[in-house]
């Protein structure tokens, strides 16, 4: 294991470690540039991290919040990444709505992706560099909404895409690798024994980014509990 992998005894510890690292990088960006940008992932893993971020007292008036990916569902839907973030970070942390740049999941997917890209470009320019991108890893090795077999994992030009994810029977909108890998700090939060095989494949498996899209995160900094890294050598 390398020093880029931070291992904690449990999911709460990993979430706190990741939250603190994110907060430090955002505070540094604010001190340097007066503003900061953060793109977060969805699913369920970031909930603990968001609750910790609320406690850290960040100056959200200076932080622009984006998402790594979104399910194309209304913002009130149980599956909405925005809804999960709203419940665990935006409302309890009193984030100003002006700082929140959500994917319009209630729109048709291609139009939602185009609108999201234009919102990113308006905030960060045509070659966006988020101060922090926080990714997750699915138990199948996906990251963002780039699932195994998705050729867009090789795209190094585009910023945002709409894509049909057959295994989820769902449209998604996702950041593409270029803006993810261009982040000033790229963090991965992964916890739980159900992630152990995916984490091992991502970090130490034979090179196969098409089959294991989270391999594109090999140079990122990882925050994991012991269960998720149990197969790492
Ligand atoms: O579908 C998604 O899954 C991944 C992993 O979610 P988790 O709940 O297993 O941690 C997530 O990173 C992504 O944002 C989400 O849309």
Image (tube, grey):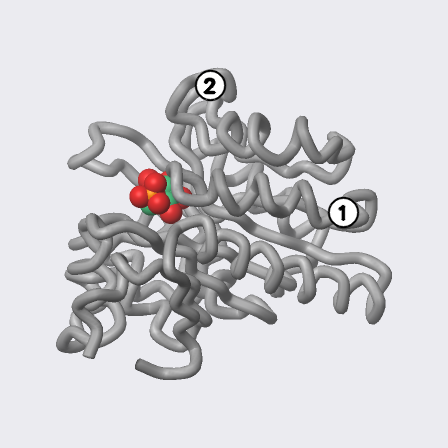
Q: Residues within 10 Å of mark 1 (few under 14, many from 20)?
A: few
Left of 74 or right of it: where is 191?
left
Which part of the image, by quadrant, shows the C terminus?
A: bottom left
Residue at point 52% right, 31% down?
82
Asked whether 112 or 87 is in front, the reply is 87
Task: Name the N-terminal-most of marks 1 and 2.
Answer: 1
Asked whether disc 1 touches disc 2, contact meaning CB atoms under 8 Å apart, the reply is no
Could you tell me if residue 201 is visible in this image?
A: no
Relative height, residue 187 to residue 1 (above, below): above
Marks 1 and 2, how far apart at CA: 29 Å
Left of 194 or right of it: where is 135?
right
Residue at point 65% right, 32% down?
90
Relative height, residue 2 to residue 193 (above, below): below
Left of 187 or right of it: where is 54?
right
Asked whether 93 or 124 is in front, the reply is 93
Q: Which residue is mark 1?
A: 57
At mark 2, the secondary structure is loop
Residue 174 screen position, x and y as percent: 42, 46
Which part of the image, by quadrant, shows the N terminus?
A: bottom left
Asked whether 147 or 141 is in front, the reply is 141
Relative height, residue 88 to residue 64 (above, below): above
Residue at point 75% right, 31% down?
94
Q: Which residue is mark 2?
A: 74
Taking the image as four quarters, which one is ligand 1 found in?
A: top left
Residue 103 screen position, x and y as percent: 53, 34
Give the farthest residue toward the front: 9
Residue 38 screen position, x and y as percent: 62, 53
At mark 1, the secondary structure is loop
Residue at point 20% right, 68% down?
200
Q: Quadrant of residue 28?
A: bottom right
């Amino acid at each position: 294991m390398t020093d880029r992998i931070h291992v904690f005894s449990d999911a709460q510890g990993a979430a706190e470690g990741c939250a603190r690292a994110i907060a430090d990088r955002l505070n540094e960006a604010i001190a340097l540039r007066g503003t900061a940008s953060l793109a977060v992932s969805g699913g369920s893993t970031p909930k603990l991290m968001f609750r910790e971020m609320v406690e850290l007292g960040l100056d959200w008036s200076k932080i622009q919040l984006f998402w790594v990916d979104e399910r194309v569902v209304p913002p009130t839907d149980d599956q909405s990444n925005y809804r999960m973030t709203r419940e665990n970070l935006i409302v309890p942390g009193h984030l100003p709505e002006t700082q929140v740049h959500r994917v319009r999941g209630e729109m048709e997917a291609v139009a939602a992706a185009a609108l999201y890209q234009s919102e990113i470009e308006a905030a960060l320019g045509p070659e966006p560099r988020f101060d922090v991108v926080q990714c997750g890893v699915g138990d199948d090795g996906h990251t963002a909404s780039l699932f195994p077999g998705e050729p867009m994992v090789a795209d190094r030009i585009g910023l945002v895409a709409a894509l049909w994810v057959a295994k989820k029977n769902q449209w998604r909108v996702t950041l593409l690798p270029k803006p993810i890998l261009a982040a000033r700090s790229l963090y991965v939060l992964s916890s739980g024994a159900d992630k152990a095989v995916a984490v091992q494949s991502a970090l130490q498996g034979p090179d196969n980014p098409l089959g294991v899209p989270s391999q594109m995160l090999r140079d990122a900094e990882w925050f994991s509990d012991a269960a998720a890294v149990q197969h790492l050598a």
